[in-house]
Image (cartoon, grey):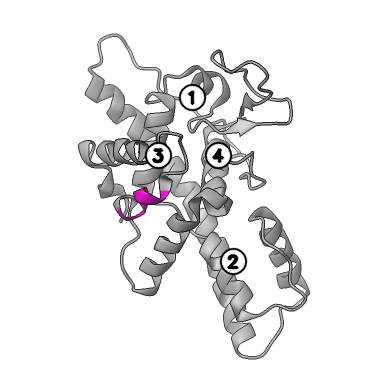
Amino acid sequence: MGGIAALILTRPARPEPPLPAGGGSETPQEKKAAFINYLVPHVSEVNASILRDRRRLVAIRKDVADGAQPGYFDARWLKKIVADYEGEWPQRITTSFLDQMLVRVDAVPPSLVIAQAAQESGWGTSRFALRGNNLFGLRAYDGKGLVPKARDPGEKFKVAAYKSVRDSIADYMNNLNTGENYIDLRMTRRELRLRGQPVTGAALVAGLSGYSGRGPSYVEAIRAIIIANNLGRFDS
C-alpha cells in the first residue's frame, strides 16, 4: 500500500460521532448493520466532494477542447488538484492531460469502501479503528500514528491515525486514485464510464489484488463481503 495521501477533507462543523461500539445484546448481523449504516453517509460525503472536483475538471476540459486555456482561478485550482492526485504539471494544459486526471479524480463505489473497511478493521472493532479512526490499514512513515503489535523487527512504519473517519475514507480513496497498485482498477472504472455502464464494487474489486500480500484470495474475501451483505445496493 502507498503512504498517506495529501487529499483530506475539511473537518465538519459538528463533531463526528464515534464508531458504533455495539452492545453485548446485539447479534453479529445487528453489529454489521450498525457499522454499514454509520459508514454510508460518510462515504457519500467524500464521494460527493470528489465528484464536485470531477465536474469542474470536465468543464475545464470542454473549454480546452474549444481552444481556450484555463483562466487564473481555474489554473490555480487545477494545480492543487494535480498535486493532491500526484499528477505531473504539464507545460500546456491539453485535453489529453485532463483525460489523464479524470482517470484519477473519480468516486469509489460505496460497496467497495464498506467491504474493505469491514475487512481491514474487523467491522470497526480493531485497535487502529477505535484509537486512530483508521478503517483501512493505511500506513504512515512520518513517525506519527500507532505502532502495530506484530510489526517485524527493523520496520519503521506506523499505522496512520486520523482526526475523523471521514479523513480516513478520503485518504483511502486518494490511495486508490493515485497508487500504482491500482492502475487496473482506475482503467476499469474509466472504461465503464466511457461505455455508460454502472461503476460498481463488483466490477472494480479485481483491481484490489495489490492491496494485500494475499493477492487473489484478498480480492475474493472482499467480493464475498460485498455479496453476503448486499452492499451493491449502495452503488446506485
Query: Which of marks 3 and 1 precedes in the sequence?
Result: 1
Kindly report the secondary structure that dominates the magenta region of the rendered protein.
Answer: helix
Instruction: Say which element carries label 4.
Output: loop
Q: Which residues are magenta?
A: 203-207
Taking the image as shown, residue 180 lies to the left or right of residue 188, namely: right
Q: Nearer the viewer, mark 2 or mark 1?
A: 2
Circle 3 sits on which residue?
215
Q: Nearer the viewer, mark 3 or mark 4?
A: 3
Work out whether residue 135 or residue 206 is closer to the camera in this orientation and state it: 206
Q: CA distance from mark 3 to mark 4?
A: 12 Å
Q: Nearer the viewer, mark 2 or mark 3?
A: 3
Identity, as a three-letter code, of the amino acid under mark 2:
Met
Q: CA distance from mark 2 to mark 1?
A: 34 Å
The residue at the point 44 percent across, 52 percent down is 108
Circle 2 sits on which residue?
101
Above or below 183: residue 103 = below
Residue 80 location (% of width, % of height): 72, 59
Q: CA distance from mark 4 to mark 2?
A: 21 Å
Q: CA distance from mark 4 to mark 1?
A: 26 Å
Identity, as a three-letter code, of the amino acid under mark 3:
Gly
